[in-house]
Image: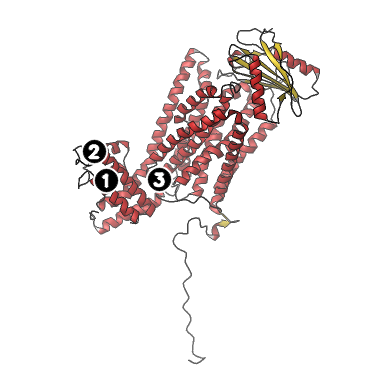
Amino acid sequence: MSKSHAAPEALSELDAARVRAIEATGWGARMTFFQPRNLAFWIWAGLVAYGIWHQIHATASATYYAPALSLAFGVFALYGAVFWWFTQHIDRYATQPGLLRVMAFLWGGFAATFFIAAPANDALLGIYAKVFGQPFAMSWGPALAAPFTEEWGKGLGVLLFIALAPRVIRTAYDGFILGAFIGLGFQILENVLYVANSASTQFGSNQIGASLSTFAVRMSSGIASHILFSAIFCTGLVYLLGRPSQPRRIGRGIALILTAMVLHGMWDGQSAIVFSIFGDTGAGHAALICLLVGLPLLGVFLVVQVFKVAVAGERAFMRDMLAPEVARGVLTEAEVEAAAGDRKARRRYRKAGAEPAASHGLGHRHRNRAVLDATFDLAAELGRSGGETTDRVEFARSEVVRVRTRAGETEPAPAS
Amino acid sequence: MTSDQPVPSPVPAAPPTSSARPPEGWVPVERRWLGLDRRTIVPALVVLAFALVCHLALPLINAALSYDEETRAGDVMLLKQDVSFTPAAGWSIEAGIVEGDEPVSASLPATTRLTKGQVSYEVTVGSFDGTSAQLLDQLKETTDALNDSAGLHVTTDPAGITTRAGDDGMIARFSGEASDGALAAFVKDGVGVEVVATAPSNTDRETTEEIAAMILDLRFEGEDAA
């Protein structure tokens, strides 16, 4: 290991800043599953248990549609795994514990769906039909029900998780990631429900065939659906509530919550919106196609902007986390900038140092990618240790050096 | 040492202190209420309140309201795939669209449900690749599979039926624990129609005739009302 490059006083300042960053972000903080004195735990457990029971009961009652349901569970489990991997991948800063992600997924998949949204949506659609008439309920009912029942049902899970893991959920970015996992759970189970409903549309005679279009629609629209809505909503909720490391931003919080609800409402009411403006005409159908394509693009654009705003604070904390490692000569400024930077900064770093590496080493891009991964590992270990130098931290430091020198180089990779 | 020598006052011991951070999950006693961590009560109750409103309150409100829309003479009920029928007057529309009052979303329902007291009349449309007899068999199969010993089961052999528009279908009677009814199936050009009429055993003759008339008034695409 390289010798420290900084004066002791400067190093202790940097170490202190790191400890503050760890405290502020909850980096490496753990959570306990069974918290008997925590009312939030019992609420979470009770509502999730109900949802699981409901799903088991519904599945057992519909064994006739077992082929379609089995296919749905299998396909959407794989689909969900891809989104799970992606969401976990972007949670590269103060990474949330796996337990919290699973609990968030279960909340979205079982509590928010079967205990909250399903009965509420059915009831609201009936109320709208009885009060405003069948045509109104058919046209506008979903758009005026789901944004309230589903978004709030999912989003209020964040309140429970803040009570369950107050040391973990510290920033708006935590809300963003948590919201994504909650939305993923909701999306997967809702997809299964839609397939089950469509399996019966040809009187049960062609379960798989009748479900195929539903599979296609749900998988293609899922990208810009519940995962996206919940990520935005839950980010807004954390801004609205404030956390010890997240100043309360009421206006921003309300704006994000409303954005998620409006996006959801527009998604559910596309036909009604378009045809009420253009009528059931050629122009109306053309406008509907534009909305079908444009709305997901708008959603993706908005969620990326929300991501950029929420992640900015995490990147600043990452710099504080790794600055002492530069002072200790473990990392370079370039490596810290890449780890704390955006996708372009990471790509720039990976491409840097185009000179051929030593013959038995890694290509420079592969080497740089490995160094970056080892840097994130080091940050994770420092978070877990609270900034202390433990055996695992020392090993993580040695891994950075090992990977960097695997190509035969003795000096850190040059800055871009 | 003699007994009258002053006894030095004992140095008061420092009070015991807790460690800087309590163990994971430890709730200090002053923060407990009925054994629970006070700080978790409000957020948990907020979530529970919302959940109960959604799960209980809204359904109760919905159940307390009734459908005001009723069918009138001359109405035509519209369904998907250009299926329609003429309803009897005075039936509550629990689900369905009347011609001339189509939703702005331009979509029509796959199911129409009308009720009159304890009598219900439900028409469902879907794609079906087969004959009316095969559709009726399919409906019997799914009804038996989904309802087990509960629910309705076909109790008579199916008989042929022809609508006023000239479409041939099949009809069978069924019975359940507290009600009887009729199950009819029609198929034309890949469009299947299921009709389920359910009524108490002592349903009056007028209502039974209305049900029969509605079944016979079923129409597919391009067919005019009789």
User: In the rendered image, which quarter is residue A370 located in?
Assistant: top left
**On the same chain: label 2 and label 3?**
yes
Give the number of the mark in front: 3 or 1: 1
Q: Say if B137 sits above or below A191 in the image.
A: above
What is the crowding at mark 1: few (fewer than 14 residues within 10 Å), some, or many (at least 20)?
Answer: many
- In the rendered image, which residue does mark 2 sit on? A363
- Residue type of the residue flagged with mark 1: Val
Mark 2 / mark 3, whichever is N-terminal: 3
Mark 2 / mark 1, whichever is N-terminal: 2
- Residue type of the residue flagged with mark 3: Thr
Residue at point 45%, 63% (across, down)? B19
Q: Which element type, helix, strand or loop, lies under badge 2?
A: loop
Q: Which element type, helix, strand or loop, lies under badge 1?
A: helix
Would you say the residues marked 3 and 1 are in contact, meaning their CB atoms lie under 8 Å apart?
no
Q: Which element type, helix, strand or loop, lies under badge 3?
A: loop
In the picture, the disc for residue A95 is 3
- In the rendered image, which residue does mark 1 sit on? A403
For the residue pair A213 and A150, the one nearer the viewer reads as: A213
